Image (cartoon, rainbow, N blue to C red):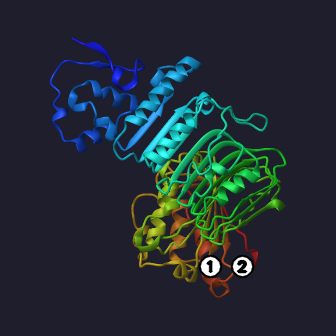
Amino acid sequence: MDRSIPSSDVEGEMIHADVVNGLDCISKLPNDVLLKVLSKLSMDEVLRTSVLSKRWLDVWKETSHIYLDMRRIANAEILLPQVSHQAARSVTKIIKDHRGHLERCTIYHDSLQCEDGVFESWIQSLVNVKHITHLKLVNLFGYVSANTRPNATLDLPPKSFSHPDLISLFLDKYNLEAPHAFDSCWSLKELRLINIFAETEVLNAVLVSCPSLVVLALRSVFHKNSGTMKIENPNLKFLFLSCDGIEGLNVSSPDLDILSIEYLSCDEENCVTASPRLHSHRNYWAAGCCFPHTSYNLSCAYQGEESIAHKIMLSGTIEYCMTTLSLMSVSVDLTNAKEVKMLREVLAAWPKGMGEVEFVLKDNDAAREESVSPIGKTRNTIWEETKLFPSAEFHVDRVYLSNFSGSKEEFALASSMITHGTVIHKMVIRPSSSSTTKKLEIIAGIKELMELPKCGKYLRITCLSPSLW
C-alpha cells in the first residue's frame, strides 16, 4: 500500500516522498555506486531517498553536486514572502547538513535572500567552509534592461569569492554596485556574469582582481555613457561579450582563441581588440554596428591536452555562443589532423544552419610555429572518409576561403562543400597574398572548383583577386 511520508528531517514540511513497500535491493550497493545513482537525480528527488530506509538516510549528504531550485523546494512557480523564507531555510539546512566533498553547487533563489543576509551566509558557508570549486547563483525573478536594473544587489564583504579552491563562478541577474567582493580572486579561472547591471569601472576593477581568468562571459547592461570596458587578462582563452551602455571596448589578451560578440553599443572606432591569434578578413561592422559573430583560432594544446576554449565551445555551458551567433571566422591548418577534428566537432555541434563561415587557412610556416607537439598530419586520410564534412545535417549560406593556396587539403574541403550541398548560396575564394609563386596552381584549383557539379542550383563561386585572371 502506498503512503506519503513527510521527510521533515531533511526539509521541514516542504517535501513529501512517495514510499512504496517492497524490497529495496539498491540499498545493498556500496556508497560510491549509490552516489552515482543520486548524481542522475534532481536535488528534491535526491532528498526524498532519505526516507526509503536508514541505509539511504545520509547518502545524499556526500554527493559532489548540489542543485537547489527554490521553486521546486516550495513546489511553487511564484515565491510569496512566507514561502520564500521557508524555502530559504531548507536551502540553508541542506548546505549545512552536507558533509562530503562538495565540488559544485547551483542555487536558484528569490531576491529576498539578498536583503536579509541569507544569501551572504550561503556564500560564506559554500566558499569558506565547504570549499566549493564551481558555484552558480541565479536570481530567479530579476529583469535587466537599459532602463531596469535587477531587483537583487550583490552587497557582499570584501574577498567573498577569493578562496583558492573556487575556480568557477556564474552569477545571473544581479545589480553590482562595488567590486570588493572579488578582491584577490587569484585562483578564479572561469567567470560568467550574465544579466549584470553595473558601472563600467566596477566591472573593470572586478577583472583586474581576477588575473588568472581563462574563460570570461559578460552579458551585461551598464549605466549609459559608462566609459570604456577594459579586458586585459593575459591568460584568457575564451571571451563572450554582450555589452549595452559602454562607450568603448579595449581587449588585450594575447592568448585568446575564441572571441564571441553578441552585441556592443560602442562605435567601431572605439572598439580595439589586440588578440594576435585571431584573424579575419571579414568586416563585421559593415552596417555601422557590430554584427554578432565568433572568431576562433583552432590550436592544439600542449602535449595533447584538450583545448579549454574548445571544450567550453562544445559543452553547451555558454549555449548562446551558438544559438545566437550565426557568423564565424575560424583559423585552421588543414594539414593538422587534430585541428581538422576540432573543426568538424565545432561545425557539427552548431544547433542550426549558419549564415556565414570564413575559413582562414593557415600556411605551413604558421602551422609549424604554432605546433608544439607532434600531433600528426592529415595527409589524405581525413578527406577519404565517406561521411560528409562536417556532417550531413550541417549547412551554411556563405563560405569564405581566405589565404587559399590551392593545396590538396584546401581543394578537398571546398569541393566537398560544393558537391554535397553544404554551402547553399555563395563561396568566395581569397587567394593567399604570399603565394605569387604558386599563381598557376591557385588558378587551376579555382577553375576546377568552378567546374564541379553543384548540388545547389543557386550556388555562386567567385574569386576576390581579379589579377589572377
Q: Give me the C-alpha separation between circle 2 and circle 1.
A: 9 Å
Residue wearing tag 2: 468
Residue occupying image coordinates x 30% and y 14%? 4
Q: Across the whole image, how many numbered discs are drawn on residues?
A: 2
Q: Can residue 124 be seen in this view?
A: yes
Is 344 situated left or right of 286 in this image?
Answer: left
Q: Position of residue 252 (x, y in %)?
A: 69, 67
Which type of secondary structure does the marked residue at label 2 adopt? helix
Q: Do the residues labelled 2 and 1 touch (CB within 8 Å)?
A: yes
Residue wearing tag 1: 442
Three-letter code, disc 2:
Leu
Q: Which image quadrant for residue 119?
A: top right
Residue sitting nearer the eye, 322 or 175: 175
Q: Position of residue 127 (x, y in %)?
A: 49, 47
In this picture, is 200 found above or below 257?
Answer: above
Residue sitting nearer the eye, 106 or 259: 106
Q: Where is residue 47 in the image (x, y as percent from the top left)?
A: 35, 29
> Badge 2 local density, few (<14 within 10 Å), some, or many (20+)?
few
